[in-house]
Image (spheres, rainbow, N blue to C red):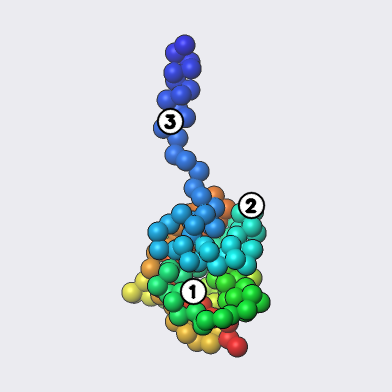
Amino acid sequence: MRWIAFCIACLMSTPAMAANVYEFAEETPGYGRFASLMQQTGIDKALGNRGPYTIFAPDDAALTSLPQGLDREKLVQILTCHMTPSRVLTSTLSPGTEAVVRPVGGCRLWVRRTADGIVVRDDAGRQHRLTRTDIMQSNGVVHAVGSVIYPAY
């Protein structure tokens, strides 16, 4: 009987497994629109796989800048510029250093640690500030970004 009580106590004190990178967007207030767009395009299914993935997740406010009437192909291209098939941790960046990241969408991103935080530069030279970094999930990591990363058309 003591063994059963011990096992139940162990299970109750064990933290729940972190959500996967898609579930982060789906379950975190302020990222519902990003989750909805991933679901609309079918990307959510791929992000439920083992990974590892890194997601640069724009919040709902940032996604208001998306042009109206985007076709599925263009939307997939934009969304996949926010996703890499590898784990990118900003905690490993030294001040002033830069890492090149290759998202699934064919974009190229440069991630740099500055005195003011972490900044991502895209192919077109636009700067995107990360508002939260290294949010670990069961199949990767999420970085919250305050703007939408567009491909260099």
Look at label 2 and name its amino acid. Answer: Arg
Is 49 left or right of 57, judged from the image as shown? right
Q: CA distance from mark 3 to mark 2?
A: 25 Å
User: Where is residue 15 drawn, in percent x and y?
Assistant: 44, 39
- Determine which residue is flagged by label 1: 111
- Determine which residue is flagged by label 3: 12
Is 73 left or right of 9, judged from the image as shown? right
Instruction: Give whichever of 68, 14 is nearer the camera.
Output: 68
Is 120 left or right of 117, judged from the image as shown? right
- Counting every numbered tag in the picture gives 3
User: Where is residue 2 drawn, in percent x and y?
Assistant: 44, 13
Asked whether residue 152 is in view, the answer is yes
- Determine which residue is flagged by label 2: 50
Look at label 3 and name its amino acid. Answer: Met
Residue under the point 63% across and 79% down? 71
Label 2: few (<14), some or many (≥20) within 10 Å?
few
- SS at badge 2: loop
- Which is in the foreground here, disc 1 or disc 3? 3
- SS at badge 3: helix
Look at label 1 and name its amino acid. Answer: Val
Residue under the point 65% across and 59% down? 46
